[in-house]
Image (cartoon, helix red, strand yellow):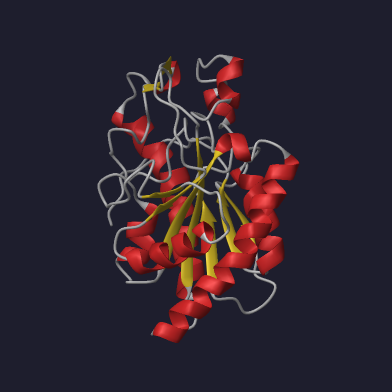
Amino acid sequence: MTRAPTMPLLSAADPLPYHILPAREESPFVMISDHAGQAVPSSLRDMGVPPQAWERHIAYDIGIKEVGRHLQNALGCLLIEQVYSRLVIDCNRAAGHPTSIPPVSDGTAIAGNQNLSQQERYAREEEILHAYHDEIERHLAQRDKGEFLFVSLHSFTPAMEGGEPRPWEIGLLHDHDPHSARLMRTLLEAEGGLCVGDNQPYVLNSHNEYSVPYHAGRRQLPALEIEIRQDLISDDAGQRAWAERLARLLPLLWAQRKERA
């Protein structure tokens, strides 16, 4: 893909756009976390966003970094985290998507995203979006030809601004691979008392999202996008509890897939 030249966005003092937690052992799982980070390039300062807004769901997926790290520690698999805030650029959206660099997010104006030049947009796409996904591609290319489950980790707000409360504790999003979502839903519902969303609170497809369709869909890899409600993972106890649950259920899901293959 030809990419337009840009002025540098990130300085030597800014972090890389991805953080890698390498696999400790052979694993049938590869995990990514598109909205784990809250970093902002130093050149963008606070983007005109009030301090309290940086702690809201509009800036990052609350609790999912901690869940992902506990889960990675339990499973020993590869985890790739996106480091920059989704307000800088949403790395689960294709370049040029209307919500990729939002001028307003859930009622909050993002001054630093308004009236951007094409060059400013390209800089964010090149140095953060593409760099993150190129790193995922590099790791996937190193995998054996055997199947593995591509797991995308997210969290969702209990209610959008002025919206109805969302009843689901966890949502399972799927597009090309509904089979994995069905297996995981059965396992979760067997736990008792959980409200599990099927493509809720969001629908996964190539228009609405990017990471799973781009990396797993075009390869026809087994894939599952997991969304956990943020009030359930806003503290250490909840983060550990959900990581322990997923660390127990994901291997069961994979074993069932292999048995029925």
Q: Position of residue 258 (x, y in %)?
A: 46, 83
Task: Please give the count of numbered marks on the rendered protein.
Answer: 0
Residue 11 in sight from this viewpoint: no
Decide: is 199 above or below 39: below
Residue 227 in sight from this viewpoint: yes
88 sits left or right of 191 in the view: left
| Identity of the residue drawn at 59% across and 47% down | 16
- Please identify the quarter of the rendering in which residue 107 is found: top left
Q: Position of residue 143 (x, y in %)?
A: 50, 77
| Identity of the residue drawn at 52% across and 56% down | 32
Decide: is 167 above or below 179: above
| Residue sitting farthest toward the right | 237
Q: Position of residue 129 (x, y in %)?
A: 43, 46
| Residue sitting farthest toward the left | 207
Quarter of the image for the N terminus: give it: bottom left
236 sits left or right of 256 in the view: right
